[in-house]
Amino acid sequence: MQALQMEREIVSLEQYEALPEDVRAEVFDGQIYYMASPSQEHQTISMELSTILHTYLKGKKGPCRVFHAPFDVKLYDSPLTIVQPDLMIVCDQDKLDGKRCNGAPDFIIEIISPSNPADDYIRKLYYYKNAGVREYWIVDPRRKTVTVNFFEGNVLNVQYSFDCTVKVNIYDDLFVDFSEISGMLNSWP
């Protein structure tokens, strides 16, 4: 007996852009994957990290900018691959077209959601590395770890706990004190 194989529809850019605005989704190799809304803990971590990155970049007065989800990054046209990293730094202004980043950001942070940790640890690691992202962090609130992947320096899967200060490797003088962020999380009832 021959097994039936269900093929999922390949999504075009036009179909992706036609999704309702309140739908959170990413596309990997033309296949659409829907995402859940972030939790309070996720949002707190994202806001703290965004503030640290924005303040640092503003002080540098350079071309780099920080963006947060939902903001599309089109990694590939064919097959279509669009992601919405939790946080990213883009230094090449030519990659920005007013709607999205076209090509790899310089730095990406993903904050793990309990429903899909494999996406961040495996799938996105693969896509980000191959697309040319320089550095990729995975922040895991449940395990209270930060996993640093500095692709440009060929350094993969270096883990830090939330009581550490972690260096952003693409900059000489940017450090993130996760004990402060952890303290913010612990101050909530």
Image: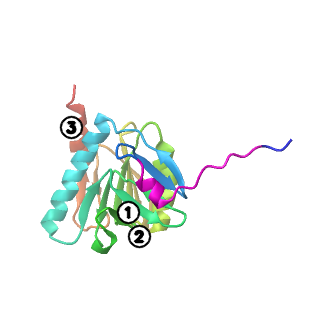
Residue topped by disc 3 = 184
Task: Report whether 111 appears left or right of 186.
Answer: right
How far apart are labels 1 and 3 at the CA level? Answer: 25 Å
Question: Over which residues does the magenta segment extend?
Answer: 4-19
Residues marked 3 and 2 touching at CB (< 8 Å): no
Would residue 105 be visible to someone looking at this image? no
Q: Secondary structure at mark 3?
A: helix
Q: Quadrant of residue 102?
A: bottom left
Q: What residue sits 31% from the left and 43% below the top?
A: 162
Given residues 70 and 165, the one toward you in this image is 70
Would residue 32 be visible to someone looking at this image? yes
Q: What residue sits 68% from the left and 46% below the top?
A: 6
Q: Quadrant of residue 142?
A: top left
The residue type indicated by label 3 comes to: Met
Residue 89 in the image: above or below residue 63: above
Looking at the magenta stretch, what is its main secondary structure? loop
The residue type indicated by label 1 comes to: Glu
Residue topped by disc 2 = 152
Q: Secondary structure at mark 1?
A: strand
Residue topped by disc 1 = 135
